[in-house]
Amino acid sequence: MDAIILQILNGLDKGSAYALIALGLTLIFGTLGVVNFAHGALFMIGAFCAVTLQRILSLSTVTLSKTETNFLGQPAEIKTPYVESWFGPEAGAAIIDWSVPLAILFSIPVMIAIGFIMERGLIKHFYKRPHADQILVTFGLAIVLQEVIKYFYGANPIPTGAPEVFKGSFDFGVLLGFDPNAIIYPYWRLVYFGFSALIISAVFAFLQFTTFGMVVRAGMADRETVGLLGINIDKRFTIMFGLAAAVAGLAGVMYAPINSPNYHMGMDFLVLSFVVVVVGGMGSLPGAVLAGFMLGILESFASMNEIKSLIPGIDQIIIYVVAILILLTRPRGLMGRKGVMEE
Amino acid sequence: MFGLAKKDATLLLVVVGLTLLAPFILNPFPTDSAMAQFNAGYPDLMQRFVIFGIFAIGFNILFGLTGYLSFGHAAFLGVGSYSAVWMFKLLSMNVIPAIALSVVVAGLFSLLIGYVSLRRSGIYFSILTLAFAQMSFNLAYSVLTPITNGETGLQLTLNDPRVLGISQTADGSIPVTGLFGLEMRSTYTMDVGAWAFQFNVGYYLCAVALLVAFYLAIRIFRSPFGLMLRAVKSNQQRMNYTGLNTRPYTLAAFVISGMYAGLAGGLMASMDPLAGAERMQWTASGEVVLMTILGGAGTLIGPVLGAGFIKYFENIFSKINDNVLHGWFSFMPDGLENFVITIIHPFIGKGWHLTLGLLFMMVVIFLPGGLVEGGQRIATLFKRGKKDDDGADTSKAATPAE
């Protein structure tokens, strides 16, 4: 029993990342009808927002120490970050420590701006072109974004720590009445899961309970009629694109402490997220979320030793096997609607 | 000639000329000159041109004709490489059985994957092929290690059985691949003045394979079968409504393109007898998509051009460094020189993928027909300039290479 709960928990953080990326992909596909292969790159840029903010906050003045010397016998350099000299040592250190959560605030405007530029500058011209062209041009864009990041940040992963409070793990099993040390779970992964649940519900609430969201949903169902009613649906869809970019970016920001950001992390997640979208059903938002968590948890179950010894290698391929089975038995995915992507 | 229309025969002859004379054409600069680094006429690179040309031609038979965008073609290339290396390990170092086996195995593998994947079209097909290819890649990396040798890659060893050959040569080293005693790596260097032209046995084997592959592609493009595939691309639904089952045709196209990929994989292993899982990764599949689109999907010569273009720039562009640039721009004043080099710097050397990505985006946005369409536009421009009254003919002649 405790093993099962542990695997479900382990699957949650990956599943959250899949669900968030897949949610953004589905939003873009459902509103604009564009298959965005650059969405993984947006996730990656989000993670690098966290890196950038951490670097900005750690900018320091260098002074030479009068008493201490380094191993060469010269005066040692003391680095004092600007934030520490501005806000006092304790508050400054706390700000640097909390740079990843702070990067959430930093990344939202950045990601929305990137989303707007992408949509207005490039994607807009591809509405009428075939899906293959959309895939190709966004694939090219993903390569470009990836290489730009690689140029500025290098090819190596950059460790980006979570705040000190959330480092380490806690004994989850004790809460549920199991033996101590049966279920150990890192704090940050729990934070990640809570955060993504929050974002997902925020997106759904936004679409469900606001007038703006209602118009967008109407536009998803029948774009032409909404346009004829005198509503500028294109503008709203552009905003939705920015929102989807922000969702991907936020997923990336919070993922940075789990996995040190490197320039190709977007591509790694993209392939799986597409599988998630297709399994969930193209254009279905709940389907994307459901499939994201489902595949994340399945993946962690498949990597249990008991299952691996039964079917060797299953942990490597489980997601693809499930995707193939679902596509062949339920062509529209788990919750896909009729008439979406069926030429 | 060979049952080809005059236009196609001319195209074939041009390709024959280009491939057979490649050691001359790709070596335009004297060996000692400053431009020598732009020479592509060395065996290793020429082999890669031709092998990826074959790969792209095969991919184009599927994507260019039927419009099915496969994101998992590298799997067939990888399977082909593995089977060729196994043939070298078990049977002999002769390349013929190795290549034959790799084509057959890749064909069977693509039959299996195609049978399942072709039940869906559009993006679902892309995802299915991607899923299968990633599955093969992950399996080759982990569980299938006894067959694929996992991360290290499959290599020849001194105690391979090699039933029809020798396990090791007299001096105790691993024998090299060859064709009835003709070693693949043997190269004849011809010195003409300041130039050194290299003629490599392996390259000419690949070149012959390319020519056969290209000839077959022309025949497929011009056959009723090819016409059927084009019909699938333009409107599959209508084809189905006329009571015709299109799946056997698309499956045949898929298997043919898989066999082309297997041939490319077999040749790759024949030139350098090792095979690694990274050849099956989806980025490798993405590369052949780039080549085909860049050259011009659906055209005969396009994929070959695209493959050559990408491989050339991958090798040559990435060798340009800041010192070379300083040499080029030394005529400018120092400040300007440094400024220009700072601007160009991100696009060269290690950053060449950035250039490739930008170029690829430009092509998809402005030239959906790829380099071939670009060439045609320029050609029409010149023709229009020459004789205005020939408008009807130019529109016909606008698709010579198609």
Image: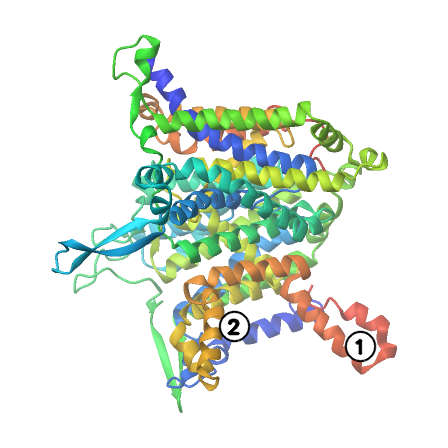
Q: Chain of mark 1?
A: B
Colour scheme in use: rainbow
Q: Which residue is mark 2?
A: B19
Q: Quadrant of residue B394?
A: bottom right
Q: Tell me the kind of residue under disc 2.
A: Thr
Relative to the observer, which residue lies in front, A118 or A326? A118
- x, y (%) of residue A198? 52, 25
- x, y (%) of residue A45? 49, 46
Residue drawn at x 44%, y 64% is B48
Residue B3 in view in this figure:
no
Q: Badge 2: few (under 14), some or many (20 or more) residues near its Cα, within 10 Å?
A: many
Q: Is residue A299 left or right of residue A32?
A: left
Q: First in sequence: mark 1 or mark 2?
A: 2
Residue B63 in view in this figure:
yes
Q: Which residue is mark 1?
A: B384
Distance of mark 1 from mark 2, alpha carbons? 31 Å
- x, y (%) of residue B132? 49, 38
Say above or below: B31 vs A234: below
Q: Secondary structure at mark 1?
A: helix
